[in-house]
Image (cartoon, rainbow, N blue to C red):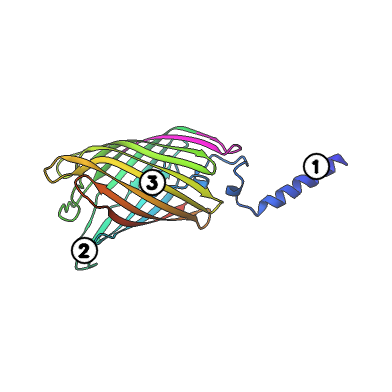
Amino acid sequence: MRIQCWILAAAGLAAMLSGVPAQAHPWLVQPCDVDDYITKAIGIEEPWLENAVYGFAQADNNGSPRALTLSTEFERKFSDRLGMELDLPAYTANESLGPGQGAFGPAAAGLKFAAVHTCNFSEGRASLLTVEVEGQYWANPRPSVLPGEGNTVTTQVMWAQLWYPWFTQGEAGYTQGVGAGAGSGWFVNTSLGHALGAAYAVQLEVELDNQVVLGDGRRGIGGHVMPQIACHLTPQWLLALGEQAAIQQGQSRSLWSSWLMVEHDF
């Protein structure tokens, strides 16, 4: 009789959980896929390795001429430790669309190595640390449309920490310009987020760098703040919206832009 009761109880629990997404139960022991619990920030490279494609749209909201930038990024996982990133050339179009100036930016590719990847989803905990080396190449430079862009090599460290439903992630590194056009300098970008159930997440992203080229040719300090909200449309599809306020040394006003990110996991 006792064995029958255990069998019935297990069957009832399985039936109860079968229709509920795993994200709703952080105490369940799941495969170490933190993408189910940590939502990617729009402007931060994710420290976990995955197979995914991202689409980005940035609309400049600062007077005239305004601009629209469209870009695509691919992520590929080779193993639990090694992966890669491929950024296709982004297209920036100044208003009015069509007659206004436009240009394709640089392409970039990088190798990612996961140095630390520990998970304990029974306690809602995870820690990640990843190193990436990325090269950027601009085949058709148009500095009049995209000033400050050029060929670069970037070395960065990316991290994430989960305390479900809270999480944080970030990246820090140094970009070295190669040849004319692109500046060199350090950067750090981090965010703090909170999951709102299984489907939604909010977070605040903050970035700081010294890669701004001032009028006299010196490098200056720049950065941005971007609150954002994301929705998991399905386990494979993510939609995120953000409003960015960018500040640059020597300017007395913020530069505003709206961001849209669409992610599809394979």
Disc number lying in front (2 or 1): 2
The stretch in magenta equals 118-133
How far apart are labels 2 and 1 at the CA level?
70 Å
Name the element at disc 1.
helix
- Return the residue found at the far top: 115
Q: Which residue is mark 2?
A: 64
First along the sequence among labels 2 and 1:
1
Disc 3 residue type (three-letter): Glu
Residue at (49% x, 46% y) in the render: 194
Residue 185 falls in image quadrant: top left
Q: Which residue is mark 1?
A: 6
Residue 180 falls in image quadrant: top left
How far apart are labels 3 and 2 at the CA level?
26 Å
Residue 130 place in picture, x, y as percent: 40, 35
* Residue 188 falls within the magenta-colored stretch: no
For this rendering, which residue is in front, 164 or 74? Answer: 164
Residue 140 place in picture, x, y as percent: 18, 52
How far apart are labels 3 and 1 at the CA level?
48 Å
